[in-house]
Image: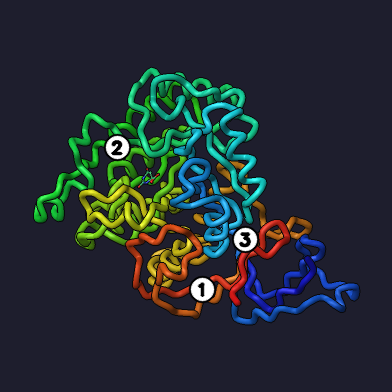
Amino acid sequence: MNCILKDAMVYVNKEFTKKDVFIVDGTVTFEHSPLFFDFQVIPFDGKFIFPGFTDVHVHLREPGFSYKENIETGTKAAAHGGYTAVCSMPNLKPAPDSAENLKVQLDAIKKSAVIDVHPFGTITKGSLGEELSDMDSMAPYVAGFTDDGKGVQRDEMMLEAMKKAKALGKIISAHCEDNTLLRGGYIHDGEYAKEHGHKGICSESEWGQIKRDLELVRETGCAYHVCHISTKESVELIRQAKKEGLDVTCETGPHYLVFSDADLQEDGRFKMNPPIRSEEDRLALIDGIKDGTIDMIATDHAPHSAEEKSKGLKDSLMGVVGIETAFPVLYTNLVKTNIISLEKLIELLHDNPCSRFGIGVELEEGKSANLTVFDLDSSYKIDSNCFLSMGKSTPFEGAQVFGECLMTISNGQIAWQKS
Ligand code: DOR
């Protein structure tokens, strides 16, 4: 692909500069050449060009659950959201718990992905928590190991997994949830649950397991990442672990930063795991973003069918989509409100996830073009009918936001373009 993206504000070397981006045979250059005389010129004056975002936590559902999403729809949705790299979660069928089972997903990625997909392997066989997966055989192909969707319940199992991951030089990405504390809960154990007669999930079910894992990180020196943190205690535990020098990072999701349980409605689109917590938790997460305790924002894009999400807070499945709304939601709620800068948001959506997981591509001279173009002045109401994802359930339905993705280029090819 050859073209000139003209006059945009471009994020290069961690700052925005007005310049032209030349894409020559799919590669980025900032230097004009007379040889580019017949290139298509796309005027982007007043628009912003970012390196393609990287989401380290998405559910693409293929193989096994393609009635919810597949690799083609999920990656097209990601490109529509400005992403050029995602890490896919392993709650699939077959679960990627050996090189052989992982290959089913790798073949599907090769066939249908429009952006880069880096799968996670499971920590335990079938994510059942009983036996370690074949981490050795998967290591060369995976972003790391996780049993996302479930916590690893047994301490000895997590200890074994961390020792193995350390030996392989791989990250453990932990969904932290202590099943003994769940007691049938399905939303946050707070005011809303009390007032509306719902069963709550206590905060300790998350932070208790983070605390356990940090002890194991101390013992093993394993590189450890915590998925979707939602509680103030989790923020504080990770803050202290970082001060101590442990090799620890974490992510949270847009919905935890924008909503508290006071915003819940009796609708499955407000149900996910972990749940939206209290206002105090939300504010602690914002502090964690500001002081660097929280390294990145991941969407936990978790599509389900309309039927599966139609059963209210109690009986709908856990999980909401988010990959097509993350940037506009975060830009509107965190940047336009002056809580963080636009540069900081790009760090959270690109720089930090890329450096931690060794994936993604910088927007640099000579690199393959992986970038996204946004109109930050465009304001619209989020409408799930416009999603490319098969999942439509989002707590942000109808929200008024700023920031529209005009184009995403992945590995030098257009993966999304507004028509
Ligand atoms: O809400 C969630 N949905 N949380 C998870 O941990 C798993 C995910 C899913 O796979 O649907």
- Image spot of residue 84 (x, y percent): 61, 56
Kind of residue at badge 1: Glu
Report whether 255 appears left or right of 74.
left
For label 3, the crowd category at 10 Å Cα-Cα, with few meaning under 14, some 14 to 19 and many 20 or more, is many
Amino acid on which the number 3 mark rests in the picture: Pro
- Frontmost of labels 3 and 1 is 1
Q: Which residue is mark 1?
A: 404
Q: How many marks?
A: 3
Depth order, front residue of 254/115? 115
**Alpha carbons under labels 3 and 1: distance apart:** 15 Å
Q: Residue at x 87, y 78 (%)?
A: 37
Residue 251 in the image, given as x and y percentages of width and height: 43, 47
Can I make out residue 27 in this image? yes
Secondary structure found at label 2: helix
Quarter, ligand 1: top left
Q: Residue at x 77, y 72 (%)?
A: 3
Task: Identify the secondary structure beneath mark 1.
Answer: strand
Contact check, label 3 and label 2, Cβ < 8 Å: no
Q: Nearer the viewer, residue 54 or 110?
A: 110
In the rendered view, does 411 fall on the left or right side of 76? right
Q: Quadrant of the C terminus?
A: bottom right
Residue located beneath label 2 in the image? 207
For the residues labelled 2 and 1, the Cα–Cα distance comes to: 36 Å
Q: Please provide percent x and percent y for residue 240.
A: 37, 38
Labels 2 and 1: the sequence-earlier one: 2
180 above or below 262? above
In the picture of the structure, the residue carrying the numbered disc 3 is 51
